[in-house]
Image (cartoon, helix red, strand yellow):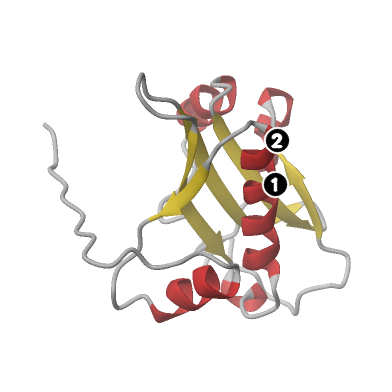
Amino acid sequence: MRAGAVSCCPSMSTTFTFLTERDADVLNNVPTGVFDNAVDPSLVGEFLGDPRHHIAVALDGGRVVAFASAVHYVHPDEHAQFWINEIGTAEAYRRRGIARRLLGLLCGRARELGCVEVWVVTGGNNVAARGLYRSAGLSETEGAVMYSMKLG
């Protein structure tokens, strides 16, 4: 088994919380497959230190088994919005409602902050993510196209 992989069945004691700067050490215990890449301690401090960044986690026995992150942002001509950046769940914990609960926590935080919209982008072939977002009440934006460019 790969180092950091979840080796047993999920317990019934999964807890959900938002992380703050004081919780940086929580991200030292993340199984492979939850995030796209290994957690970088130098980026954890920067992320958690920014009050516009938000991360909700699902913990099982002190291990982060799922997370959802978002950015609260404002424009000079629009009310605040909440961009959901990513949701990740360890394979053994998928299809148990954990990602949906984390998404609900983010939407609740967005409401508390006075945001007028929550949005997320996913690939057209990401069936699981699209199902999650629809089940949580998000609507697909017809005709939306994402552009990106690598810098450096």
Res 65 seen here:
no
Residue indicated by mark 2: 112
Q: Position of residue 81 (x, y in %)?
A: 48, 37
Q: Position of residue 40 (x, y in %)?
A: 46, 36
Label 2 amino acid? Glu
Count of numbered badges drawn on the protein: 2
> Where 8 falls versus 90 (above or below)?
below
Q: Nearer the viewer, residue 35 or 75?
A: 75
Q: Secondary structure at mark 1?
A: helix
Contact? badges 2 and 1 (CB < 8 Å): yes
> Where 35 falls versus 19 (above or below)?
below
Q: Quadrant of the C terminus?
A: top left
> Where 57 falls versus 129 (above or below)?
above
Left or right: 1 in relation to 61: left
For residue 112, what is the image quadrant? top right
Q: Nearer the viewer, residue 69 or 6?
A: 69
Query: Which label sits on residue 108?
Result: 1
Q: Position of residue 22 (x, y in %)?
A: 73, 24
Q: CA distance from mark 2 to mark 1?
A: 6 Å
Q: Secondary structure at mark 2?
A: helix
Q: Nearer the viewer, residue 13 or 112?
A: 112
Label 1 amino acid? Gly
Q: Position of residue 124 (x, y in %)?
A: 28, 74
Left or right: 44 in relation to 22: left
Which residue appears at 60% of the width and 41% of the height?
55
Which residue appears at 88% of the width and 65% of the height?
13
Which residue appears at 69% of the width and 29% of the height?
20
Left or right: 70 in relation to 18: left
